[in-house]
Image (tube, rainbow, N blue to C red):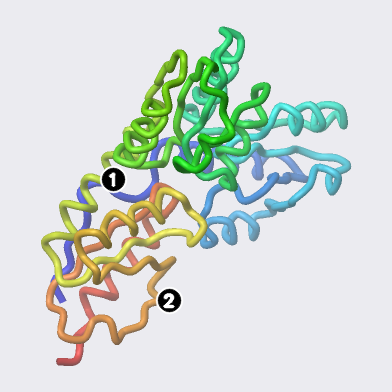
Amino acid sequence: MKVLVAEKCGFCPGVRNAIKLAEKTLAQEKEVYCLGPIIHNEDVVCRLSESGLKTIKSIEQIHSGTVLIRSHGATSKELDEIRRKSLKIVDATCVLVKRVQQIARKLNEEGYRAIIVGDKNHPEVMAVVGSAPDVRVVAGPEDLDNLRSNEKLGIICQTTQSPDYFAETVSAILKKGFSEVRIINTLCRETMARQEAAVKLCRQVDVMFVLGGLHSANTKKLEELCKKHNPQTFHLQNWEELDKRVLSGKTTAGVTAGASTPDWVIEDFVRHLQNYTPQP
């Protein structure tokens, strides 16, 4: 089978840095904990677990050792609690996510109601909400009813959303007639480049595969965008999850991957796909 790989896919600089920090910390420290998965990729999390990284849900579970702050960041309350317990902190937060947190705090200091456009249940958004006083999450127009029209709004966005989604939501906000609106583009350029490359590729192939963690926001967004242009788009974590029946009658396949998908997962998938002979 002919396989085409998106020009831009796989690990972004922020994720690559987080993994390097994790590996370095594991080599130097005896007890290393991560508050939630360091990235949204089970294959990577399992590999780091085998090296000793313990992924936990609550700081209450840690009594000694080192806490690795995952790429999505942590809230101010969580960081304060870790410091109160005199635990060592290694910060693997993506620099772009840190920037969003800093902007949210600055907007608050300047008298704006900070609004983040994104998924309220995503750890990046939760960390931003917990990094400044009273940050509101807007997932869609329906959330605008909770805001007062006389408020000054400072709008930022979850880094992994698409430009179209951000623009549509901002447009809906502007139509509500708030007294003042300040918009700061906090979208990740790496994410946008992956989205553009994926959409371009999916139009050229019979079937499109998006590789990455099932809970990865940027990977799910890649799947969503590709499906708009190619209904034969499938989100998988790795080759083992592929239902071979979807290859029937296909001659050309496209492959892209989320920013938290390692090269070895992509390479393994492509190699198997190239060697596969689909049934007519």
Q: Residues within 10 Å of mark 1 (few under 14, many from 20)?
A: many
Q: Nearer the viewer, residue 8 or 135?
A: 135
Q: SS class of the residue under badge 2?
A: helix
Residue at figure coordinates x 73%, y 40% from the top left: 29
Label count reads 2
Q: SS class of the residue under badge 1?
A: helix
Residue highlighted by disc 2: 241
Residue at figure coordinates x 80%, y 32% from the top left: 82
Q: Nearer the viewer, residue 270 or 209?
A: 209
Residue 123's x, y, as percent? 59, 43
Which quarter of the figure has residue 81? top right
Residue 121's x, y, as percent? 59, 47
Q: Is residue 3 above or below residue 72?
A: below
How far apart in space, not on screen, are marks 2 and 1 (Cα)? Answer: 22 Å
Residue 171's x, y, as percent? 34, 31
**Residue 194 - label:** 1
